[in-house]
Amino acid sequence: MLARPFDNSAASDFSLGGGNSQSNEYLLNGVPNMQDSSRLPGFSPLQDSVQEVKVDVFNADASTGDTSGGTVNLVTKSGANQFHGSLSEFNQFSAINAPNRWFAGTTKQPAYRQNQYGGHIAGPIWIPHVVNGKDKLFFLYAYEGFKGSQPNPTLTTVPTAAERNGDFSALLGLGTNKSATRCTGYSTTYNSYQIFDPASGAADPNCSGQALRTPFTNNIIPASRLSQIAQKYLSLYPQPNVTGTADGQNNFYSSNNTVYSYSSNSGRFDWSIGANNKLFVDVHRSEYQPIQNNYFGNIATGSKSYTVYQGGLVDFVHTFSSSVVMDSRISLTRSYKNSAIASGGVQPSSYGFPGYMDSSSTAGAALPRIQFSESGTAYTTLSAASPSRTAFDTLQFFTAVTWVHGRHTLKIGPDLRQNRNYATPTAPGTNNYFTGNFAFDNTFTKAGTALAGPVFGGSMASFLLGVPSSGAYTISPYLTFNNHYFAGFVQDDWKLTRRLTLNLGIRLESETSIN
């Protein structure tokens, strides 16, 4: 239960019982409800559908485990003989928000919207002349939705119309003659914005191990030298819409919004099967889709992630006698995360890349990332970082037999789990570019290997020439990792007197390595 139901990562960053914040156990109706191996909570039920929240730290019995911190268990409501329900809506938008008075002239509010709504209905399952569930068959259904947008304005850099055609001549008028030492006794003088031809490098006869390049005439790259791939990418850049610096930095403003969309559905069914048996079934699913950083409004920028939490359980309670009760349940929970980019589905070959890049990526086809580095505000990166897909399943079988014998209440049983993680492995300390990444700077457009590059524009010139400073393309399989968790427990609540009860328990746990 969170203010925003998809904020289940940061909101769970707390410690229980002195343990690490990621060592807590989150349960929903007694079964694991966690995203993945990070142990952050998964599905967040509608607040009105929750019967109780129980937090155990030091007083948890032996039937609870797999944690070195605390246990948080959310129990949902069940239906009853009378129909009941609720509806709710919380709406926030710019027109009713107070203006920001901290800064002068900020009387106009940015376009902020948030609409959170939901409801639930519960009661007996009743179909006239078919089913009368009074006293034995009940249901609860809950729905929650959230839609919102939050301003994320951005000032960034795009190439000018002239630069797209290889014309950087306007920069020369801004430059100053710069004298730089190549090696002892030898120096070179050139314009600080001059772009040099990377194909013209010749060994410097006076400085061992260095090269000198020829400048492009009037700082214009010939049309015949322009990369066809670069030309396709340049069509994704919008034209400058604000006056930036004299050399063209910070010349594009986007009033981009981050858009959120969330929905959840959950259902619960309770069935009293005679006097000695009860069956309880729970199913739930939530979907969260934020769209972020789409500054250009096309496939060049932005990401759209997709997160699903879903699960279900069947719980059966059998009463053998007034003193012996067995509670058995089986559950399956799954989290699925797909971090997609705006260009997802675009075939790289349609932009001039080799055909094998259309199908060899584990994350699916998308445009390779084009990244720029400058001494000033670099040109905006085209295509986002590599997408990813992960899924995490937990299958649990749990049984607890409770026996009340004199002053003792004994509980004994197993807790068996299988965890399965589907993911593309990430090498430690490295970046993984499943759709490709090409970086451009002024390494190959400066006067010489030991000299400084142009103040600005060198990375775009390198891009137009098709000369990256580095590139990477990661090919990695989509793997499945498994591990198993076994536990057995015995709990004895021994009532010594009316005022004193000893809670004694032992739990043995074993967890296999990942395979």
Image (cartoon, rainbow, N blue to C red):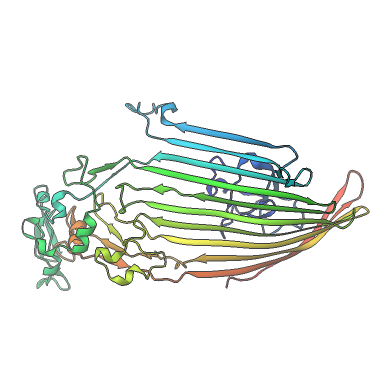
Q: Position of residue 234 (x, y in %)?
A: 21, 55
Residue found at the very far left of the displayed protein: 217
The residue positioned farthest toward the front in the image shown: 129
Residue 173 relative to residue 113: left or right: left
Q: Position of residue 400 (x, y in %)?
A: 78, 59
Instruction: Report the residue at 58% width, 43% height from top.
Output: 143
Q: Position of residue 392 (x, y in %)?
A: 56, 61
- The residue sitting at 16% across, 56% down in the picture is 454
Number of marks in picture: 0
When the figure is inspected, residue 448 is found, relative to residue 271, above or below; the finding is below
Which quadrant does the N terminus fall into? Answer: top right
Position of residue 221 in the picture relative to residue 396 (left or right): left
Residue in the foreground of this view, choosing between 367 and 459: 367
Q: Is residue 489 visible?
A: no
Instruction: Decide which of 165, 268 is in the foreground and name it.
Output: 268
Residue 68 left/right relative to 342: right
Height in image: 428 above or below 7?
Answer: below
Nearer to me, 161 or 288? 288
Placement of the C terminus among the 4 image quadrants: bottom right
Q: Is residue 328 left or right of residue 459?
A: right
Tell which of 297 and 140 is nearer to you: 140
Q: Residue 35, image x and y in percent?
A: 56, 56
Q: Is residue 227 visible?
A: yes
Within the image, what quadrant is residue 449 found in? bottom left
Q: Name the residue at 32% across, 40% down.
A: 255
Image: 323 above or below 436: above
